Amino acid sequence: MVAIVGAGIGGLSLALMLHRHNYNVQVLEAVEAIKPLGVGINLQPSAVTELVALGLLADLDRIGVRTREVVYFNPQGQSVWAEDRGQFAGYPVPQYSIHRGQLQVLLLKAVLQGLGQEAVRLGHRVLEVDAASTALTVQHGSTSYRLNPDLIIGADGIHSTLRRQFFPEEGPPCFSGRMLWRATSFAKPFLTGASMAMVGHADQKFVTYPIAPIQPSDGLQCINWIAELRVDDLAPDRQDWNKRVNKDVFADAFADWRFDWLDIPGLIDRADAYYEFPMVDRDPLPSWGRGGSTLLGDAAHPMYPIGSNGASQAILDAKSLFDCLVKQPHDPQQALRDYEQDRLPKTASIVLANRGQGPDHCLELIRQRAPDGFDRLDDVVSNQELHDIAARYKALVGLEKDRVRARVQTDANLRRIVASIDQYQSAVA
């Protein structure tokens, strides 16, 4: 039996993959009920490919948006760099902008339907891990019990119990000096109605994209947004990583960011609630586990929310771990080490690249070279320089088109779905 600690996107994706190969899976989740909470995320084509393989394409189309492009703007609202995304960029599958909570609920329903209601134990908190004997001490209500699985997968997020036990001296997450305020607003679509917009620079940025189809009743769209400011003197000293605040804390800094393509102050005003998150990550670890235990997703490699990679890398972790277990059916502990050898260096590189702003570095270049805007972009930065910034990051995170296409070609089921992929969106519409 494989025990997965944490019913997040990575843990639930792994459960679905393992079930398809007849593994006995038990998911342990501390919260009593999983609700569609949170805000928006993006799923890159490399990760979408794995969800498509699990039969979830139609569901993704129903609740998400096929991302058409990402566009970067300076604080004056001038376009700096634009790239097509997903199918619009020639990938065999879409990229999706989607509500994180709705995606989690979608995956949970798929697990319960496929594996049965007993496969997920809600309200079961892992207290202790015995890596030597591959055992867990679990608390449910006022009682505790011992579970003895064959493997333990810690997919329990940035405050992972397993990680803290394996590395007790690590301490709290590393604060970047920047704070994020996140919300969703119902507003008129902007640009293509399926665009991601990044505005500003490293110390002040506004990121926004739609996460649901346009409502036919009023023509409005649920738009996710993140306001970011450098606040070095406000280092978080709390465990409240999802604090509700008043918009006055941050909104004045964006009061002048009204452009002909988007009214940012207006978008902020239309939100019902505002949530504050410190931008944090953790230093890469020397290893992810011991014996029959390992880590996955944010428990293994929490990273800054740059480049749309948090959820995507968790899904890719799940695929790598699944593949390693299938290749080593008689030595699952070696499979965990193979998985770690594959994924740890890749994700460590992304963590460090995101500290350098990843693909958003193009905005910082513009601030340094033309802080007051420009008459001609070519006088500030060449198209080749901008292209190279984007290409380096794609290679780092596994987003080269040939790599994604090769993954599709090696799976007959995927080839069949991809061959008719446009029919899914037509059916949903």
Image: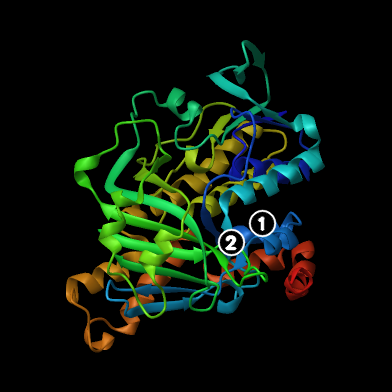
Q: In the picture provided, is 63 more to the left or to the right than 234?
A: right
Residue 198 horizontal/vertical position (percent): 38, 68
Please state, as top left, top right, bottom left or bottom right, where the N terminus lies in the image: top right
One can see residue 196 in this view = yes
Q: Nearer the viewer, residue 228 or 176?
A: 228
One can see residue 130 in this view = no
Q: Is residue 28 above or below residue 46?
A: above
Label disc, if present, on residue 50 of the rendered structure: 1
Q: In the picture provided, is 163 more to the left or to the right than 237?
A: right
Do the numbered discs 1 and 2 sit on residues whose CB atoms are within 8 Å? yes
| Amino acid type, callout 2 | Ser
Secondary structure of the residue carrying tag 1 is: helix
Residue 215 horizontal/vertical position (percent): 64, 68
Neighbour class for label 2 at 10 Å: few (<14), some, many (≥20)? many
Q: Is residue 306 above or below residue 286?
A: below
Q: Nearer the viewer, residue 257 or 366?
A: 257
Q: Residue at x 32, y 76 (%)?
A: 77
Q: Is residue 261 above or below residue 254?
A: below
Residue 92 horizontal/vertical position (percent): 65, 72
| Amino acid type, callout 1 | Glu
Q: Can you identify the residue that label 2 sits on?
A: 46
